[in-house]
Amino acid sequence: MKGRILKGIGGFYYVHAEDGKVYECRARGLFRKDGIKPLTGDEVTMECVQDNEKDAGNIISLLPRRNELIRPAAANVDQAVIIFSLGYPEPDLTLLDKFLILMGTEDVQCVIAFNKNDMSSKEQNNALKTAYERSGCRVLFMSARTGEGLEGFRNCLEKKTSVLAGPSGVGKSSIVNRLWPAANMETGELSRKTGRGKNTTRHTEVFALGNDTYILDTPGFTSLSVDFLEPGELRLYYPEFMPFMGECRFRGCTHVTEPGCRVRQAVEEREVHPARYESYVSIYRDLDSEESRRKRDRIKRSHQS
């Protein structure tokens, strides 16, 4: 039979098969031999095994992946829906931009959904909408508490496989539970001491919400690294820079300190949003640091060996 991996825990993979059942499966030894790790969202072929207590099986093979994400670890997604909070926790826009960069390296379209918009001003929302629509993302605002904007969020997920991601405590599970109560995701208040969600998602899991509509709920994160990128590659993941490429005074302009930079001029003229540019400069300087360069060198050496 064919099926799809809903989640993987402790060496077991839970596969939603074409007969409508969910089987607890192990991956055959050939996956370990070939260094292949099944991912949540993988489409597989499987065989049933006799077990008097549960539906069980073995994963025989992985079907070709449309794409593969490293963080969150998942396969075969149509879009990434990044949920951030407009209340507590306050949105960390550099963290958001790093996630957009990660999805850009995998060529995955992103939707940005800001929850708790009942705790923000119209001016703040308009500024965020302007900044991120110029980056090529669809931007949504909603409130799991009041229900405002949830229907638009539901519509953006229809007939797609979407990976939901965002920091702990922004309300991912609360939103999905309100729209699809049968999902029954764990929720928890944000810990005031740590700033992280309590009793929330600990592993990536697929939920079937309707015909051809799936979401992959993922553990919350508080940090992301894009150290694998060379500093000169970063500008490729800021789509709003693209109209001005090639118009700078110096070839190979980094858009950070050089005079005659067309991108910096676009920032001054509000053709590029200042917050996005400030994020770019911050991330560029991190990538250009000696520590990041050493990390990339270690990664290269490990691949060569």
Image (cartoon, grey):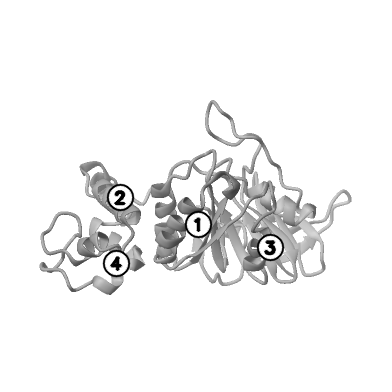
| 9 in relation to 179, above or below | above
Residue 61 drawn at (x, y percent): 63, 67
| 47 in relation to 220, above or below | below
Q: Residue at x 67, y 72 (%)?
A: 159
Q: Earlier in the sequence, mark 2 or mark 3?
A: 3
Residue where numbered disc 1 is placed = 35
Q: Residues within 10 Å of mark 3 (few under 14, many from 20)?
A: few
Residue where numbered disc 3 is placed = 151
Residue 161: quadrant of the picture: bottom right
Instruction: Mark 2 and mark 1 in contact? Answer it, CB < 8 Å.
Output: no
Q: CA distance from mark 4 to mark 3?
A: 32 Å
Q: Earlier in the sequence, mark 1 or mark 3?
A: 1
Q: In the rendered structure, which amino acid carries the disc numbered 2?
A: Ile
Residue 117 drawn at (x, y percent): 57, 49
Q: In the rendered structure, which amino acid carries the disc numbered 1?
A: Gly
Residue where numbered disc 2 is placed = 283
